[in-house]
Image: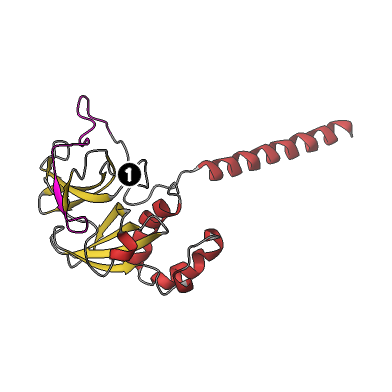
Amino acid sequence: MRNKLYLIELLVTLLLVGCQNTSKKETTDVYVPSFPLVEFVRPANVNPIITPDSATCFYCPLTEDSVAWESNDTFNPAATTYGDKVVVFYRAEDRLGKGIGQRTSRLGYAESEDGIHFKRERYPVFYPADDCQKDLEWPGGCEDPRIAVTEDGLYVMLYTQWNQKLPRLAVATSKDLRTWTKYGPAFAKAYDDKPFVRVQENLPELHNVIGSTFFQHIFQVGFNRYLFKRR
């Protein structure tokens, strides 16, 4: 009788171990998407590819004066492709303020044939101007670009408008990455353009506001960066 009980206990133990192993195997499987971005390699003796430059000056239409627009910081880039070239948009700050968030940001343009060696434009390609977005972009500027492209070749950029009072996520589009049309805050019709305090609770509603699959994707990429900005 004791031997039978021992055999039963042994069988139950083996079954439990087998179930645990199966469960562990199922939970440790890693999902790999159909478009994985893996195995990045940092090239030697290349970085940083873009650094501040006090020699490049730009005539600011709002101050009506020349400004060294990328003399203090160059950071928070976005990358895309145009034709056979890699294009990088980067945020650049001048030295007119006392600290980050107090200076004016503009977006610089750089392109490369190999994705490593970049040629920069001397002037910003996107910046606060005397336009319909002036009140939302001045004096803080245009920050932190995120770019995607639609199937018909329209580039859509999400960026941060900063008037040194309230940051807003805004939308602009272009066909050539040089001439842009500004549309203003992406969520101007949501919550009366009020800042989002409890973001996690609002995510389902935000997805409804965004609508299309394309904007859902660019929202996930760009808006997350906007939410966790240092302010």
Q: Nearer the viewer, residue 165 or 126?
A: 165
Q: Nearer the viewer, residue 114 or 97?
A: 97
Dot 1: few (<14), some (14–19), or many (≥20) neighbours within 10 Å? some
Report x, y in % for residue 33: 37, 50
Q: Quadrant of the N terminus?
A: top right
- Position of residue 219 relative to residue 13, above or below, is below
Toward the right, the furthest residue is 1
Residue 61 shows in the view: yes
Residue 150 shows in the view: no
Q: Quadrant of residue 210?
A: bottom left
Q: Quadrant of residue 159?
A: bottom left
Kindly state the secondary structure of the residue where label 1 is placed. Answer: loop
Toward the top, the furthest residue is 45
**Residue drawn at 67 percent across, 37 percent down:** 17
Q: Amino acid at mark 1?
A: Gly
Q: Nearer the viewer, residue 49 or 210?
A: 49
Residue 3 falls left or right of residue 89:
right
Q: Name the main secondary structure of what is drawn in magenta.
A: loop
Q: Nearer the viewer, residue 156 or 37?
A: 156
Magenta stretch containing residue 148, yes or no?
no
Residue 84 falls left or right of residue 35:
left
Q: Quadrant of residue 165?
A: bottom left
Residue 147 falls left or right of residue 123:
right
**Residue drawn at 46 percent across, 73 percent down:** 192
Report x, y in % for residue 213: 35, 67
* Magenta-colored span: 41-64
**Residue drawn at 26 percent across, 58 percent down:** 148
Report x, y in % for residue 43: 22, 29
Which residue does the numbered mark 1 point to in the structure image? Answer: 97
Magenta stretch containing residue 50, yes or no?
yes
Colouring used for the render: secondary structure
